[in-house]
Amino acid sequence: MIKAVLHKGFSIALALLVVLSTLSVTVEKHYCGDKLVDLSVFSSAEKCGMEPSADGEISTKSCCKDTTELINGQDELSKLDSEITKRVKQLFVPALNYVRLAYIEPLSAKTDHFKGYDPPPLIVDNQSYYQVYLI
């Protein structure tokens, strides 16, 4: 039960990790002078009303400025490069075979696994006592 719940939890966490790593986010900031007036993550930042108007009014240079930051996520999710996997196979497989052949002893066919085992003492022969025999 616990193993299944943990498995599902880790699966959901890894799926969220993939989604969040590929997500791109735009952050817009509106400054009036040196003071941050508005910060917006997915929509455009609201203006403070100090911008020069477009109705022909002569105004001085605006103190407001807008900045936009784009945080890009991953574009491609790919497996290891084939050259890297070839290199790993060239190094790992011979090392694994060496360890397997050098340090793991093969089991002999005639090993006596029950050499030091003494069966429990037979106090009552239950089959003959109850007269129950397998046919």
Image (cartoon, grey):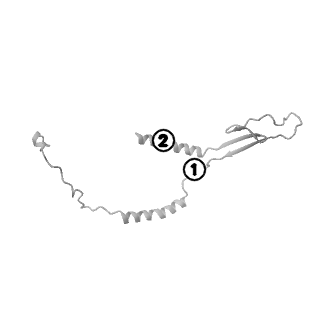
Quarter assignment of residue 93:
bottom left
Location of mark 1 (residue): 77
The vertical placement of 64 against 102, above or below, is above
Amino acid on which the number 2 mark rests in the picture: Gly
Q: Nearer the viewer, residue 94 or 17?
A: 17
Quarter the N terminus occupies: top left
Residue 79: % across, % down? 54, 53
Choose the circle earlier in sequence order: 2 or 1.
2
| Residue lying at 41% horizontally and 64% vertically, measured from the top left | 97
Quarter assignment of residue 124:
top left
Q: Residues within 10 Å of mark 2 (few under 14, many from 20)?
A: few
Q: Is residue 94 left or right of residue 58?
A: left
Residue 50: % across, % down? 81, 35
- In three-dimensional space, the C-alpha distance between marks 2 and 1, rounded to whole angstroms, equals 22 Å
The vertical placement of 102 against 126, above or below, is below
Q: Nearer the viewer, residue 119 or 41?
A: 119
Count of marks overlaid on the render: 2
Foreground: disc 2 or disc 1: 2
Q: Is residue 15 left or right of residue 28?
A: left
| Residue lying at 42% horizontally and 42% vertically, measured from the top left | 3
Q: Residues within 10 Å of mark 1 (few under 14, many from 20)?
A: few
Helix, strand or loop for disc 1: loop
| Residue lying at 54% horizontally and 60% vertically, measured from the top left | 84
Q: Nearer the viewer, residue 25 or 38?
A: 38
Amino acid on which the number 1 mark rests in the picture: Leu
Quarter the C terminus occupies: top left
| Residue lying at 21% horizontally and 55% vertically, measured from the top left | 117
Location of mark 2 (residue): 9
Residue 60: % across, % down? 87, 39
Residue 76: % across, % down? 60, 50
